[in-house]
Image (tube, helix red, strand yellow):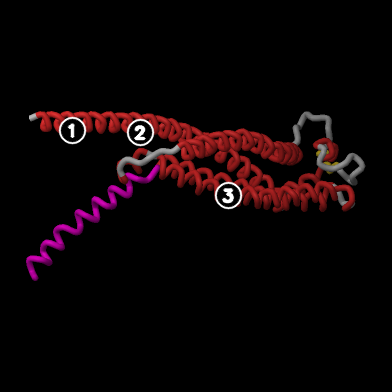
């Protein structure tokens, strides 16, 4: 019994270590990094964008458009965008998992772990479809990234105007109360909205509110999240293109090995028949 326990203590740890090394070798780290970056970017864009849109509506209702009918359409559009954000988050959570699973099954590490595997035309077609879909999503997210920079630009203009009010130029001829911000020029509320324009100390008070501070910084983070998602999709596109090329080469190698095995089998059949005929003559 003592000898058996000694063997168990010396053999099992190396086996577990080799198993762990094999498992770590089978992880597609490039796909894993791209998945984490994609999840982080989408989470930042959706979470921060949702809260920032709600804060923007509050700022408009309290300061720039006191009449509800003036910004009713904008409120509906923002509410629709918030529902779209829910859909984007759910879709990319599922799509990221699918791409990660696809990375597990198409890396060379999986081939080394589980031996040779057969590639089918259906598998190559699915891999090519992922390449096309990721390309389309990458182009779409470039548009989302550009669109998310628009509110950052608007809030930056308001913030910079407030900074001018806080420290007006000493040699300027324009009074502080004449420095204004008119959000109607951005097209988010109609020109007949009241008051639409805020000037001087009233504008400075808006910049000091928590709604403005939070919305401004959340829009910046949401824009950064959209940029991270674009980078992740580009990363995914490179990985999928490489995997598709790998599957294509594997299918060619598979066809070559099948032809070679068939020729070897035919040669063995010819040799066996020749031996049988020779034996029959002798």
Residue 206 in sight in this render: yes
Name the N-terminal-most of marks 1 and 3: 3
From the viewer's perspective, is residue 224 above or below residue 266?
Answer: below
Q: Position of residue 124 (x, y in %)?
A: 47, 36
Mark 2, residue position: 254
Give the dominant element type of the magenta stretch: helix, strand or loop.
Answer: helix
* Residue extending farthest right: 192
| Residue at mark 1 to residue at mark 2: CA–CA distance | 27 Å
Residue at position x 19%, y 54% in the image: 14
Q: Position of residue 92 (x, y in %)?
A: 57, 47
The answer to whether residue 12 is magenta is yes
Residue at position x 68%, y 45% in the image: 216
Q: Magenta segment, which residues? A: 1-28
Name the N-terminal-most of marks 2 and 3: 3
Helix, strand or loop at disc 2? helix
From the viewer's perspective, is residue 12 above or below residue 245?
Answer: below
| Residue at mark 2 to residue at mark 3: CA–CA distance | 42 Å
Q: Position of residue 217 (x, y in %)?
A: 64, 46
Q: Position of residue 117 (x, y in %)?
A: 35, 41
- Which label was assigned to residue 43? 3
From the viewer's perspective, tell me whether residue 45 is left or right of residue 204. Answer: left
Helix, strand or loop at disc 3? helix
The answer to whether residue 221 is magenta is no
Q: Nearer the viewer, residue 259 or 153?
A: 259
Instruction: Say whether marks 1 and 3 touch (CB < 8 Å).
Output: no
From the viewer's perspective, tell me whether residue 42 is left or right of residue 148. Answer: left
Q: Nearer the viewer, residue 177 or 10?
A: 10
From the viewer's perspective, tell me whether residue 26 is left or right of residue 158. Answer: left
Q: Nearer the viewer, mark 1 or mark 3?
A: 1
Q: Count residues near mark 1 (Cα–Cα under 10 Å), then give few for <14, some for 14-19, many for 20+.
A: few
């Amino acid at each position: 019994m003592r000898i058996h326990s000694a063997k168990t203590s010396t053999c099992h740890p190396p086996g577990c270590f080799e198993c762990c090394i094999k498992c770590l070798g089978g992880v597609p780290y490039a796909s894993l990094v791209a998945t984490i970056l994609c999840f982080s970017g989408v989470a930042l864009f959706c979470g921060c964008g949702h809260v920032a849109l709600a804060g923007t509506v509050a700022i408009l209702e309290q300061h720039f458009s006191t009449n509800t009918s003036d910004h009713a359409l904008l409120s509906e559009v923002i509410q629709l965008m918030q529902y779209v954000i829910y859909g984007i988050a759910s879709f990319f959570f599922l799509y990221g998992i699918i791409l990660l699973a696809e990375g597990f099954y198409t890396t060379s590490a999986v081939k080394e772990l589980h031996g040779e595997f057969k590639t089918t035309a259906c598998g190559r077609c699915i891999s090519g479809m992922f390449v096309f879909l990721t390309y389309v999503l990458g182009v779409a997210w470039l548009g989302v990234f550009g669109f998310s920079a628009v509110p950052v630009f608007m809030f930056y203009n308001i913030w910079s105007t407030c900074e001018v009010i806080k420290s007006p130029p000493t040699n300027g001829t324009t009074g502080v109360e004449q420095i204004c911000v008119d959000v109607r020029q951005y097209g988010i509320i109609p020109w007949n909205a009241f008051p639409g324009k805020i000037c001087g100390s009233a504008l400075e008070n808006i910049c000091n509110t928590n709604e403005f501070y939070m919305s401004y910084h959340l829009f910046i983070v949401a824009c950064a999240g959209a940029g991270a998602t674009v980078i992740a999709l580009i990363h995914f596109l490179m990985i999928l293109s490489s995997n598709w090329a790998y599957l294509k080469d594997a299918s060619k190698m598979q066809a070559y090995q099948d032809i070679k095995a068939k020729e070897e089998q035919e040669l063995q059949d010819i040799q066996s028949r020749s031996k049988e005929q020779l034996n029959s003559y002798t």
